[in-house]
Image: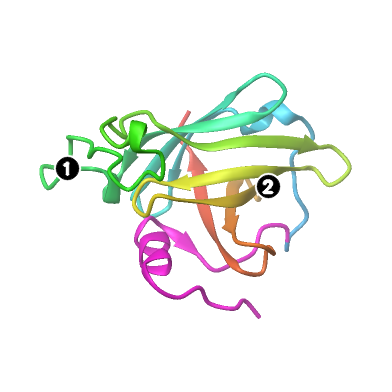
Amino acid sequence: MVKSVKGPLLAAVLTAGLIGSPVGEAVAQASSPDQIAGVWESEDGNIKLEMFDAGETYAARVLYGKLLVEADGKTFKKDTLNPDPNLRSRSLDRAVLVSNLKWDGADGRWEGGNFYSGATGQTHSAQAALVSGKLELRAYRGTTILGRTMVLRRMQ
């Protein structure tokens, strides 16, 4: 059973397209760390990420986020909730939201990463796995049970 996260984090996570199935319940299908690279979109279309090789880790930049754009649906908002005052005036357009995902070949998934929510200004732990051809990206606080999983389908 997944415990719920309360407050603005829950609303932001759910609206961004995250759902409550934990990563790794099904056997991960990735056999190579590079399988994560590419453009991925949430099943509801609320977020689109470009996963890329960042050296010894993998990261993702936002290409679209329903909560990250203005009412016109095109112009990205500023990162006004960032805890670093020097970053609050930057646009969220192509901002790196996922960082430091490290491939764990034994488990067939990426672990030890961070997920930054431009909608809340908070950073959470992250892990990812390929399950049935889809990318399950899990953001959590403390333990993986205290989080949400975003299911993404490959666009490119």
- Identified at 64% across, 34% down, the residue is 100
Q: Amino acid at mark 2?
A: Ala
Q: Residue 34: image x %, image y %?
A: 68, 26
Q: Residue 41: image x %, image y %?
A: 43, 42
Magenta residues, start to end: 1-24
In the image, is residue 142 above or below residue 60? below
Query: How far is disc 1 from disc 2 in space, using C-alphas?
Result: 30 Å
Q: Residue 28: image x %, image y %?
A: 75, 49
Q: State the count of labels.
A: 2
Q: Which residue is situated farthest in the left direction here?
A: 72
Circle nearer the N terminus (1, 2): 1
Judged from the image, the secondary structure of the residue bearing numbered disc 1 is loop
Q: Amino acid at mark 1?
A: Gly
List the residue tagged with mark 1: 73
List the residue tagged with mark 2: 129
Q: Quadrant of residue 140?
A: bottom right
